[in-house]
Amino acid sequence: MAAATIACKVSVLLSLFSVWFVYVSSDSLPNVGALPPTCQRIECPSYDLIQVGNGYEIRRYNSPVWISNSPIQDISLVEATRTGFLRLFDYIQGKNNYKQKIEMTAPVISEVSPSDGPFCESSFVVSFYVPKENQANPPPAKGLHVQRWKTVYVAVRQFGGFVKDSEVGEQAAALKDSIAGTKWGAAVEKSKSANHTSVYTVAQYNAPFEYDNRVNEIWFLFDIEDGQQTM
């Protein structure tokens, strides 16, 4: 019995990256404004915390660089993110044109653009944050491309547990409700149609074997006009 248990555990460890996004349980909502614990261990994109509100925070990201999949068509965020992440994991393990290994970072993000198609498929762009030491010349790779964001503002809602399809829409709706009637809500709506094709972005910070204190986020990207920040 003990040998079988050990063998089972080894099998699970070997397949962790293929089950990164399987739902197990939900944790309590992390503290708004708190830096995800993962970012104390590995590199994350830097940002300025602009405001902490009731159930949300506003950040300003300063030109992060991402390596991204081509859009993945799927009905499931979980499945699309798994597919995209496995490609990105191969990339950082050296399956790129430079055969260069790259340090793991966080978060892995999935930009979500719902579709009006007959099968209700959405488009998901899954991306890995490129460490600063690699940003000047990220290794190219077939099927992947570099995104260089300009300085961008982000409305953020954190939630715990493993991401599941049935919960993501609820979390995005909760973020929309929390910023409704604020200058941030108005800026999000204006930018959504003018500049950003994705409806929202899901950021995931934890490795699959981390069951406690998991942190995920819903992001609404937006721009603000000069002077609007201090209105």
Image (cartoon, rainbow, N blue to C red):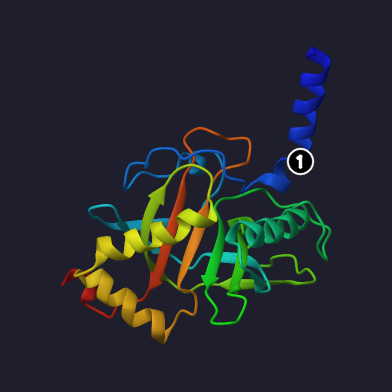
- Residue at (75, 60) in percent of width and height: 87
Which residue is at the front of the view, 80 or 142? 80
Foreground residue among 167 and 62: 167
Q: Position of residue 213 (x, y in %)?
A: 47, 35
Q: Nearer the viewer, residue 214 or 101?
A: 214
Task: Give the vertical position of 55 relative to 219 (above or below).
Answer: above
Q: Is residue 15 left or right of residue 29?
A: right
Q: Residue at x 55, y 60 (%)?
A: 109
Q: Quadrant of residue 207?
A: top right
Name the side, left or right, on which 144 lies relative to 216: right
Q: Residues within 10 Å of mark 1 (few under 14, many from 20)?
A: few
The image quadrant of residue 29 is top left
Q: As drawn, which residue projects farthest toward the left? A: 231
Q: In this rendering, does residue 226 appear at all?
A: yes
Label 1 sits on what residue type?
A: Ser
Q: Position of residue 156 (x, y in %)?
A: 37, 58
Q: Which residue is mark 1?
A: 15
Placement of 75 over or under 37, stated as above or below = below
- The number of callouts visible is 1
Q: Residue furthest front?
A: 118
Image position, residue 178 (x, y; %): 26, 60
Residue 59 visible in the snapshot: no
Q: Classify the position of the C terminus by image quarter.
A: bottom left
Residue 208: horizontal and vertical position, in percent?
63, 41
